[in-house]
Image: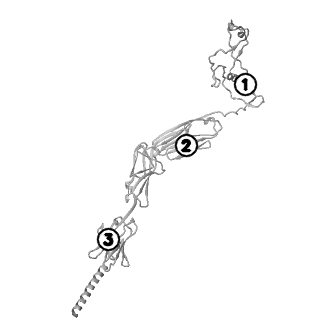
Amino acid sequence: MAERQGRSRYLTISILHIITIMCQALSDKPMFAEPIPNVTVALGRDVSLPCVIENLGTFKVVWIHVGRQMLVSVHKHVVTRISRFSVSNDNQKTWLLHIRSVEQQDRGYYMCQVNTNPMISQVGFLEVVVPPNILDSESTSSTVAVREHQNVTLTCKADGYPTPKLKWKREDNQVILVDRRTKVLTHEGDQLNLTKITRNEMGAYLCIASNGVPPTVSKRIIVDVEFSPMIFVPNQLVGAPSGTNVTIDCQTEAHPRAISYWMFNNSMVLSSEKYATETEQNSYRNHMRLTIRNLQPGDFGNYRCISKNSLGETEGSIRLYEFLKPSISPKATEIKSSANKEGRKSTAAPPRRSTTVWPSPYSPYYPRRTERPALREPEYDRPEENRRGSSSAHSTTGSSYIIRWSAPQLMVVAVQYILTGPYMPPYVPQAAN
């Protein structure tokens, strides 16, 4: 009986021991404490990928580049021949894969393995971003020359990761005319088509490449629009008195830059004590000025401004004539109006064209007119007619008569009297009996 109890006790202890060993084995199994993060790094920088493992024990850690199927390291030993890779660990828990001066081929998934049975592993992604770079060999050269009213296409190519976006703008922030219809400040795309280009579109154009990875880069392309010279003369006829200084000017436009000068009497005018020449250059515009000092009779005549370049020649003409200096202006004459009873001084009125005012029934408030309106016989009160009645309506005993004036007509007569003197009404001959 005692022997059976001893065997039973031994069996129980053995089972408990086995269970304890199994629990210890299960609890000591390696496991990943956290996932490998996805890391983004710029080209040429350094980066580290962590792999955190608990209960590693005697097991080994292996790093593999999945994309290239390349074994990088086994535990602390680097297998690959790429010297930029290295491995380190921290307290037997964190294993770091270091990559120096990252290159584009380093992009991809990296696997961290533990050689357990079965094997355990996890992966993390390394993103390598590349700043934009403009490819000069595939882009338009830095300077382009085109004749006015022709077409030109500007091209700009760039690489980088992510793929860069390209946009165009003018350096002076002026609008870009697309297809001769649409005006925009910026245009997206690797090509810029300028149709029937004009001189106003001449200048520097910028191709800007960006992909979110600093720095943003640009290429400067200068577009030269070539055309023959043109001349604008603001004043073709200029007058000045002798003994004074006078300045004449011409405005020219030309590209390539033109040679501009002045001619007088078939001779080139050069700067001297007599002449002063001045030129202001602004892009393809040129403002020429010529100052002639102390004008003499021989200085009057035709002056020509001439502009020429490799595409042509043109000229403008300015005629300089003499006029006399204005005489001293007459002083205002003081007169007294007969209507001014207080004797106040007044300035003589400017001369007027003679105007006859007729006391006709039309309203005097309308503008005066010089032609005589159709005369209508005024109304008279003849004393003889009043005494004799209607039978003697056409007989008279003398030249006296009475005129009936309306208020506006009296006002006109009064004004006429003040301005020109006594007013005599028109005489109307009377029919005899």
Sequence-wise, the earlier of marks 2 and 3 is 3
The residue furthest front is 1
Amino acid type, residue under disc 1 in the picture? Ile
| Cα distance between the residues tagged 2 and 3 | 79 Å
| Residue at 54%, 39% in the rendered image | 305
Quadrant (top left, top right, bottom left, bottom right) of the C terminus: top right
Give the SS element for disc 3: strand
Amino acid type, residue under disc 2 in the picture? Met
Sequence-wise, the earlier of marks 1 and 2 is 2
User: What number is the disc on residue 122?
Assistant: 3
Q: Count every numbered label the image shows and give the total.
A: 3
Q: In this orientation, which residue lies closer to the viewer: 104 or 401?
A: 401
Q: Label 2: which residue? A: 288
Q: Label 1: which residue? A: 418
> For mark 1, does the 10 Å Cα neighbourhood hold few (<14), some (14 to 19), or many (20 or more) residues?
some
The spot of residue 341 in percent (x, y) is 77, 28
The spot of residue 301 in percent (x, y) is 58, 34
Vertical arrangement, residue 394 with respect to residue 231, above or below: above
| Cα distance between the residues tagged 1 and 2 | 59 Å
Quadrant (top left, top right, bottom left, bottom right) of the N terminus: bottom left
| Cα distance between the residues tagged 1 and 3 | 119 Å
The spot of residue 318 in percent (x, y) is 56, 36
Query: Which mark lies nearer to you, 1 or 2?
Result: 1
